[in-house]
Amino acid sequence: MANPELLEILKKGVVVWNRWREENPEIIPDLIRADLQRIQLKGANLCRAELMSSNLSYANLSNSDLIGADLRGADLIEATFSEADLSMATLMGASLTNPKISVHFHLVTSSLSYGHHHIGRDQTESRKML
């Protein structure tokens, strides 16, 4: 289960969350099984965050730092990843149905094995990158 204190900080908004991350760089955020459906996380520092089995469907993760994040089994249905950096992120078993991504979507060395990748028609350029 997600750390309830961290969920409260995250739900206060990206500015508060990013400030907390800057003040606590050694802490790896435990957001396992968090219900973050439809949350606005544009520009959030989620580097190395543990988001396994979390519900991020319809979430806005544009411009977010998800470097090294663990998204195994996460629900990412129609999540927005425009300009997000998912370098070294783990997405095994994640549900990626119709994600909204741009051509600047970073997946360098990300692990996508065994995931469900149902990319919509409007993500033609990004499909080539997957």
Image (cartoon, rainbow, N blue to C red):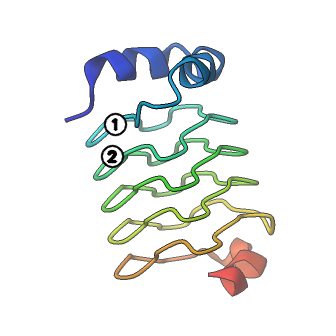
How far across and down, in percent of the image, does residue 94 sit? Answer: 37, 65
The front one of 110 and 97 is 110
Secondary structure state at the residue bearing disc 2 = loop
How far across and down, in percent of the image, does residue 8 sit? Answer: 39, 15
- Please tell me in which quadrant of the rendered image residue 82 appears: bottom right
Q: CA distance from mark 2 to mark 1?
A: 7 Å
How far across and down, in percent of the image, does residue 17 sit? Answer: 55, 21
Identify the disc placed on residue 23: none
Q: How many discs appear?
A: 2
Left or right side of 71 for 130? right
* Quadrant including the N terminus: top left
- Please tell me in which quadrant of the rendered image residue 120 appears: bottom right
The front one of 44 and 19 is 19
Left or right side of 93 for 83? right
Residue at screen point 52% across, 13% down: 12
How far across and down, in percent of the image, does residue 80 sit? Answer: 63, 51
Q: Residues within 10 Å of mark 1 (few under 14, many from 20)?
A: many
* Quadrant including the C terminus: bottom right
Q: Amino acid at mark 2?
A: Ser
Q: Earlier in the sequence, mark 2 or mark 1?
A: 1
Indicate whether 78 appears above or below 19: below
Instruction: Check if mark 2's residue and mark 1's residue have beta carbons within 8 Å.
Output: yes
Q: Amino acid at mark 1?
A: Leu
**According to the image, label 1 marks what residue?**
31
Identify the disc placed on residue 54: 2
Indicate whether 12 appears above or below 121: above
Left or right side of 117 for 2? left
Indicate whether 112 appears above or below 80: below
- Please tell me in which quadrant of the rendered image residue 109 appears: bottom right
